[in-house]
Image: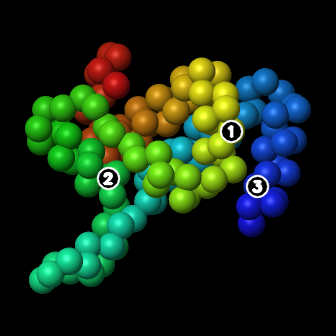
Amino acid sequence: GSEVEGERLAALLGGNAGQLEAYTQEEFHTFLRTYTVNAATQGEDTQPTLFYASRVEHMRLQNGTTLYVDWGHFREYNVAVADIVAEKFYRLEPALRQAVRNFVEDIVPDFVKDDAL
């Protein structure tokens, strides 16, 4: 649960400088890959939709280069990591960016070019 997550993060914060970045990158990538929303509106299929995967597809179709992430979604997913990221954003921003790049490459392998993201 959240208490165990908090203890793990505390250990990472006190440990190797790269551990927190690697853990944050992994957690954010997993969040992007697995976050679902229920499309239970009138007449629509009620199967959960992989929210950010569908956003990447839409971004590609629109020739966009920006993936907007709702921070509330990430806080729902892992409040402990979200709070650490909010507190140490400048330290962890490169890990978040890399997680997004990796995620976009998972969905559309030839999409990420240079520093577009």
Type of amino acid at the residue the image marks with label 2? Ala
Q: Quadrant of residue 26?
A: top right
Mark 3: secondary structure? helix
Location of mark 2 (residue):
53
Marks 3, 2: nearer the viewer: 3
Q: Residue at x 74, y 61 (%)?
A: 2
> Relative to 107, is 12 above or below?
above
Q: Quadrant of residue 21?
A: top right
Location of mark 1 (residue):
84
Q: Residue at x 81, y 59 (%)?
A: 4
Q: Are marks 3 and 2 in contact (CB under 8 Å)?
A: no
Mark 2: secondary structure? helix
Type of amino acid at the residue the image marks with label 3? Glu
Tell me the number on the disc at residue 71: none
Out of 24 and 79, give the one closest to the viewer: 79
- In the displayed structure image, the side of residue 95 where residue 100 appears, left or right: left
Location of mark 3 (residue):
5
